[in-house]
Amino acid sequence: MINPALDVWVWATCGLFLVLMATRAWLVETRHARLGRTTAAVKLLAASTVLTLAGLGVLLSIQGGTLLVNSIITKTDPAAAYYANIPDNTPPVAPAPGAPAPAAPAPAAPAR
Amino acid sequence: MTSTDTRSPGDGRGRPDDSDPATTVMRVTDPAATTALPVIAPAEAPRSTPPPAPLAPPSAGVFRWLSPAFALLAVALLPLAAATTNPDTLDGWGLAKILGPAAWGALLCAVAACVSELWSPRPRIPMLGAATGVLILCSTGLPSVVYPVARFSTAWLLAGFTDSIAGTGVTPSGIDARFYWPAFFAQWAFFRDAGGATQLDTVLKWFPPAVVTVWTIGIYALARSMLGGSRAPWAAAWLFVGLNWIEQDYFSPQATGIVLMVTVLTFVLGPLATRRTDSAGVPGWPPPHPGAKRLPFLRRWMVSAMTPPNRPTLPPRQLLLIYFCASLCLLAVAPEHQITPFAIVGQLVLLAVVGRFRGRGLVLVGVVAIVVFILIAGREFWINQLGLIIGSGDQGALQEGVANRLLGDTGQVDVKYLRIIVPGLTWLLAIAGAWTYWKRRRDLVPIGLAVVPMGFAAVQSYGGELILRIVLYGLPILAILGTDALRALVRSRGRWMEGVLAVGMAVLFGVLVLIRGGNDSYQVIYPAEVAMYRQVVAETPKGEAIAPLSGLGPTGVVGLKDHPGRGNNDACKSLADEPLVCVDADAPYVIVSFTSVEKEGVYLNGRKPGWSLAVLQQLVASGKYVVTHQDGFNWALRRVGG
């Protein structure tokens, strides 16, 4: 069940993942390590990154991933499931009326 | 033998054959005084004459002035070209037919400026850069020079998207699916507000040559890494410009997406590039002992895959800065455009699998950026319009992108065939280049980078645009491989081939102008049209719909938030198809039409000249509409009774 209020945790986990990746890159590139050896700090950061990534995966699957994959596999409309389960009972967001396809028509394509 | 080898056979004889030449030029003034070391007879008598002076660099001669003169002449001809080009006479052949001698002369001079500097014994990088800029201005930028305002209705519509965000900073909902990737519009809305401007007309006009210049800088940097040499990278940049007929360089998220994509590619194939090598630096994984039996295929690949790539010879802080910039580009491209992130991540995955760059975490950053953005920020999009992501399955991309577009008069159809032929020839040239690259470096990864975007056709629906994107995303690599093939051709055939290629370059850029301007009869926009539309919007009450007769002209450049369009109506996709029937079903408050709509009907859809005025008369005669503006083929109607 998607809860939009939980999105903030997804963004936070995503930010944490980037911070961990950056810190690990800093350690790997600036510390002199023997060939073939990985320092304990780098190992710790790598494990933390993997854990964060796993957490992010779980959050993403809860916040829409499962619904999206399900809808693609079963070729069903995700809108019905989504609007039926919004926890705060806010009125469903109307589908963009007549929203065109995402692509801008290429003017000079072998066009039209 | 090295200079540290002080061993001697002990018999007082030296080993002149084994001595280091570097030490033999040292003059031994008094051998008896250096008793601690064995005396080694000099291999040759000390030179009495001074060493010859280094060769003087070749004189540039006439080439010193040739390229600047051609470049200046090209620029000087541009105002004349603008003054002698009349957009009113555009027909199905587009821009190329109405250009006068001055415009073609400017293009030839620009080509000559590039070629003459490349032929110079001492090519100057600033001059080559300036000549390339002039070449872009005289080819890609020619429409910006000769037309009064930017062409392409889509560019004006995207400026309207920017306009709807400017001021409030809030993305409107329910208008267009492209707003779900709002970075480009928000960025320009910010620039517009910060600059105190009220419209972006000038930016729209000069955006194509400016952004192609940025792309070309990226291609040059990429080619320097992949081809080496001092001349080939410039040839690659020109080949890219000459083959870039796809025209996604108008004011659009796609154009900025390509900038970000080329930047990341430049990083990973340049400063971050590495290869899996053994400890001696030999690419690949040689057998453990000479003559030993080779390992099984699968095991060789496993060993290769698990061998970490070498570390680039860069200081750590520079590496970290490059990681940061590449990550920033990957994070920025996710909300910028729908499919560009997939292209760059696909290429990064390929490069990571074959171990061609350091910093494989960049792939993770790119994947996380795409997944998080689409699932969370784009939730409303995929929940409501999932079919657009996974494809409707109605028509294949090939059918939609090529076959369905072969419409129009003779000029239109011929130009469209050229648009099919040119990418075909591009791929043929690139395959020849891939063969050359393979012979030179035993490497097939570059052609793989151009193939990766083809995966889109299998997994994404992007309508008829997908074929264009596949060509566009592969073009940087295709142009570089093509240059490698041309370089091998020149080396094998001799210098006369350079003259042939120079002529070919002039022909290629002529064809480029023809192809790019092929739709200009209905894609050119006039200031009067823009002014009329802005006035119509100003006079229309908020909330009332403004609908174009056909989706051309500067429709939507302002007032998108306040004036909804007709939306997607399957029964009546365009008012121009069945105007009275469509109006009966859903009568918009205002209907507008432009000269471009009239010309689209004539040159693309085979209607009789004046058909849009006939529609105007029908609508007025129906009693439902009255004319509020009319100037030639530009007109606006307002619904009777509000």
Image (cartoon, coloured by chain):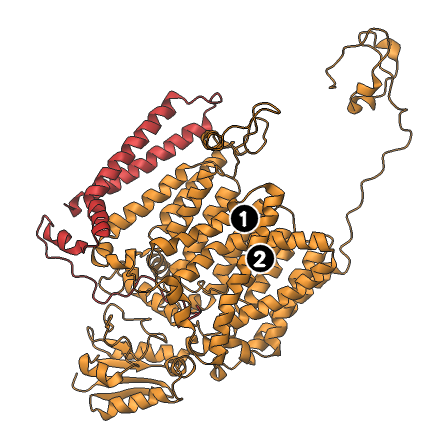
Chain colours: A red, B orange
Locate residue B53 relative to residue B144 in the image: left or right: right
- Give SS at disc 2: helix
Q: Which residue corresponds to the image point at 61% horizontal and 74% vertical from the top-left?
A: B104
Q: Residue at x 34, y 53 (%)?
A: B459
Residue B280: image quadrant is: top right
Q: Which SS class for mark 1?
A: helix
Q: Are marks 2 and 1 on the same chain?
A: yes
Q: Nearer the viewer, residue B365 or B630?
A: B365
Mark positioned earlier in the residue sequence (2 or 1): 1
Identify the residue at horizontal 57%, vertical 45% (top origin).
B225
Of residues B166 and B285, the one drawn nearer to the viewer in this rendering: B285
> Can you give x and y, in whole percent of width and height, for residue B214 in the image?
50, 56
Q: List the single residue furthest toward the left.
A: A89
Q: Position of residue A14 (x, y in %)?
A: 28, 40
Give the number of the disc on residue B429. Answer: 2
- B570 sits to left or right of B328: left
Badge 1: chain ID:
B
Asked whether residue B119 appears in the rendered view, the answer is yes
Q: Amino acid at mark 2?
A: Leu
Q: Which residue is mark 1?
A: B222
The chain letter for the residue carrying disc 2 is B
Tag in front: 2 or 1: 2
- Relative vertical location of residue B451 with respect to residue B595 in this rendering, above or below: above
Q: Nearer the viewer, residue B36 or A57?
A: A57
Report the Cα–Cα distance between label 2 and label 1. 18 Å
- Local crowd size for mark 1, using a 10 Å CA cut-off: few (<14), some (14–19), many (≥20): many
Evaluate whether residue B71 shows in this view.
no
